[in-house]
Image: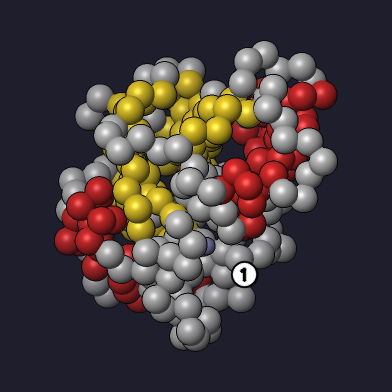
């Protein structure tokens, strides 16, 4: 699998980064993890939006899902064939489609996350509920021996640790920091993300979802103090072989 970071900013877009959106490609199949504010633009640098095969939304906050309806509009106008599977926590659809005059039923195929691992093309998908201010999920994507676990937004929870055990890449949010007081229960600090990577035995930690006003070098230093393995900071265009 190849991971491409499309957008990685937390809460709001930054000057050089859209909000959360990650493209996973394997055997010609293209899966999006989240499609947050501003991400549809840069997505077009990396993939034809009509060639996306499925989307997993971690939760209903706008920095994770607001551009989905723009993708639906684009696919509708361009006559993209078929309906795009969208897996999201229950209740997400109503929030995401609320401000739009059309529900794009012809374009989008909303699905609740199954309790057991399921297949999307050549990929096996497993989700787990995580700890956030609204229903939210983390997701593990597996192809053969390769695996990536994406935290979505979460505070510390055993569900994420269990999902991430032995993962190849841990793509983990680190939005909580001293610059963002009060967000600790619903988000992870870089140190907590690093402890998670260490406890789970993740082979590679990719920190993501920093707010635009956070200091990325400080986040890296904080994580490096805990986790000794390969460590990266998400940035638009970053590609990682999973
Ligand atoms: Zn959130």
Q: Which of 217 and 25 is in front in this view?
A: 25
Name the residue: 32% across, 48% down.
128
x and y percent of residue 227 in the render? 24, 65
Q: Is residue 51 above or below residue 194?
A: above
x and y percent of residue 69 in the render? 71, 40
Tally of marks: 1
Q: Which of 184 and 19 is in front in this view?
A: 184
Q: Is residue 229 visible?
A: no
Which quadrant would residue 76 be assigned to in this image?
top right
Which quadrant would residue 83 be assigned to in this image?
top right
Q: Mark 1 points at which residue?
A: 212
Left or right, residue 148 beside residue 76: left
Which quadrant would residue 196 be assigned to in this image?
bottom left
Q: Is residue 53 above or below residue 18?
A: above
**Applied colour scheme:** secondary structure
Left or right, residue 195 beside residue 58: left
Q: In this view, does 87 lie above or below 196?
A: above
x and y percent of residue 238 in the render? 51, 46
x and y percent of residue 163 in the render? 25, 48
Name the residue: 64% across, 57% down.
62
Residue at disc 1, CB closer than 8 Å to ligand 1: no
Q: Nearer the viewer, residue 113 or 27?
A: 113
> SS class of the residue under badge 1?
loop
Name the residue: 60% across, 43% down.
93
């Amino acid at each position: 699998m190849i991971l491409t970071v499309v957008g990685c900013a937390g809460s709001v877009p930054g000057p050089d980064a859209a909000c959360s959106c990650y493209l996973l490609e394997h055997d010609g199949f293209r899966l999006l993890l989240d499609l947050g504010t501003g991400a549809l633009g840069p997505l077009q640098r990396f993939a034809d939006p009509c060639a996306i095969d499925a989307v997993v939304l971690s939760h209903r906050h706008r920095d994770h899902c607001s551009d989905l309806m723009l993708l639906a509009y684009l696919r509708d106008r361009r006559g993209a064939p078929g309906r795009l599977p969208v897996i999201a926590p229950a209740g997400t659809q109503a929030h995401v489609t609320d401000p739009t005059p059309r529900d794009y039923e012809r374009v989008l195929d909303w699905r609740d996350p199954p309790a057991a691992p399921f297949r999307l093309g050549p990929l096996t998908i497993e989700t787990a509920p995580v700890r956030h201010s609204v229903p939210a999920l983390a997701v593990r994507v597996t192809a053969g021996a390769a695996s990536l676990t994406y935290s979505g937004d979460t505070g510390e929870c055993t569900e994420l640790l269990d999902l991430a055990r032995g993962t190849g890449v841990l793509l983990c949010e680190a939005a909580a920091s001293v610059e963002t007081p009060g967000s600790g229960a619903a988000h992870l600090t870089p140190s907590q993300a690093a402890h998670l990577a260490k406890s789970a035995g993740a082979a590679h930690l990719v920190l993501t979802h920093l707010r635009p006003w956070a200091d990325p070098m400080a986040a890296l230093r904080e994580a490096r103090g805990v986790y000794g393995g390969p460590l990266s900071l998400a940035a638009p265009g970053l590609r990682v072989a999973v």
